[in-house]
Image (cartoon, rainbow, N blue to C red):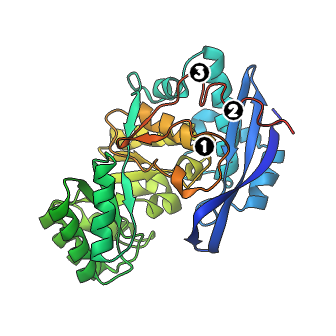
Amino acid sequence: MSPTVRPFALDLSTPLSTADGEITERRGFLVGVDDPARGLGEATPLPGWTESFDACEAALRNPPAAWDRVDDALGDGRPATPAARHGYRLAVLDAAARDEERPLSAHLADRGGFEAPADTVPVNATVGDGSVEDTVAAAQRAAEAGFDTAKLKVGARSLSTDIDRVRAVLDAVDLAVRVDANGAWDRETASEAVEAFASFGVEYVEQPLPAGALSGLAALRGRGVGIAADESLGEHGVGALLAADGADVAELKPMALGGPDAAIDAARRLLDTGVDPVVTTTIDGAVARAAAVHVAAAVPDVRACGLSTGDMLVTDLGPDPSPTVDGAVRVPEGPGNVGSSFDGCLRD
């Protein structure tokens, strides 16, 4: 099946720092297939997490036959061009769900062997690395907006400052708090952080060590606060993470895993071994964000997910099909991923 491919660029509201430098826009591709209904996907690569823009385009122009072998698409790793596969597979899955006249979440729930999907998904607010006062103010705004959970960025400042920031938020607002260090700490600092945050009742500490430190993540577990893997999962895959017993929670990015089908397969595997999946985006456009919402809705009793990222874009592919209201996103209505709301967007 040869897809239709159309490039796009979306401006970011704030520049994003990556391993390959700072980016000010998200560049990607809309992908269309006929199977038999029109199916629409999005491939938005993020170097450091996925392939480059050029590699993504090359793969989409000549999709590997292996992408259609859904059952062995993920294995213990991920495709060489996961963003491209995401766009292609989302288009195929969208077409199939539209042909069945049911939402993509129901199609994915069947694939995972789950019950009927949820109508809404709880999401967390993200609070950046600011001063104690700025952090508390941001958390208060999140609580006033209806969020029940906030994720605080930590690791750029001293541990003592981060401890003060987290303590101040928990004293000021009634929110569940999780923290994300993005691999910033060494083992000694991570151990001190885990002990401190456990005493505060923090929900979990995300990526306290660099991505390669699977054994170190495992050693931090069981101390009264959950340990979540994000970059480690992206670098090593689900199989290696589980073999290392390295996490209580795993952050699933469908774009980085290679598609909604790969993400739901990963969620099934994680749940079967007692690890909670949380679904997040790589700051994608509206089509891919909606697909991530469908993935999260298919996961039973999912924790608050990192899906409230539309406001990180100044421009988008169209109206947000899954806006955040009172700390939750509603699963897009209609058959497929976004119903018919984006029909025609591939036309010149």
Query: First in sequence: mark 2 or mark 1?
Result: 1
**Viewed as shown, does residue 28 lie left or right of 217?**
right
**Which amino acid, by three-letter code, is at mark 2?**
Phe
Q: Secondary structure at mark 2?
A: loop
The count of marks equals 3
Q: Which residue is mark 3?
A: 335
Q: Which residue is mark 2?
A: 342
Few, some or many residues within 10 Å of mark 1 (<14, 14–19, 20+):
many
Image location (x, y in percent) of residue 150: 31, 56
Q: In front: 294, or 147?
A: 147
Does 127 sit above or below residue 4?
Answer: below
**Which amino acid, by three-letter code, is at mark 3?**
Pro
Does 1 sit above or below residue 134?
Answer: above
Which residue is drawn at the image coordinates 34% and 48% (left, top)? 145
Which residue is drawn at the image coordinates 17% and 71% (left, top)? 195
Q: Secondary structure at mark 1?
A: helix
Which quadrant of the figure has residue 196? bottom left
Q: Which residue is mark 1?
A: 286
Image location (x, y in percent) of residue 155: 36, 76
Q: In front: 94, or 125?
A: 125
Image location (x, y in percent) of residue 204: 27, 58
Query: First in sequence: mark 2 or mark 3?
Result: 3
Which residue is drawn at the image coordinates 55% and 38% (left, top)? 290
Mark 2 touching mark 1, by CB under 8 A?
yes
Query: First in sequence: mark 3 or mark 1?
Result: 1
Mark 2 touching mark 3, by CB under 8 A?
no
Which quadrant of the figure has residue 304? top left
Which residue is drawn at the image coordinates 66% and 17% (left, top)? 99
Q: Secondary structure at mark 3?
A: loop
Q: Tell me, yes or no, if residue 165 can be seen here.
A: yes
Closer to viewer: mark 2 or mark 3: 2
Alpha carbon distance from label 3 to label 1: 16 Å
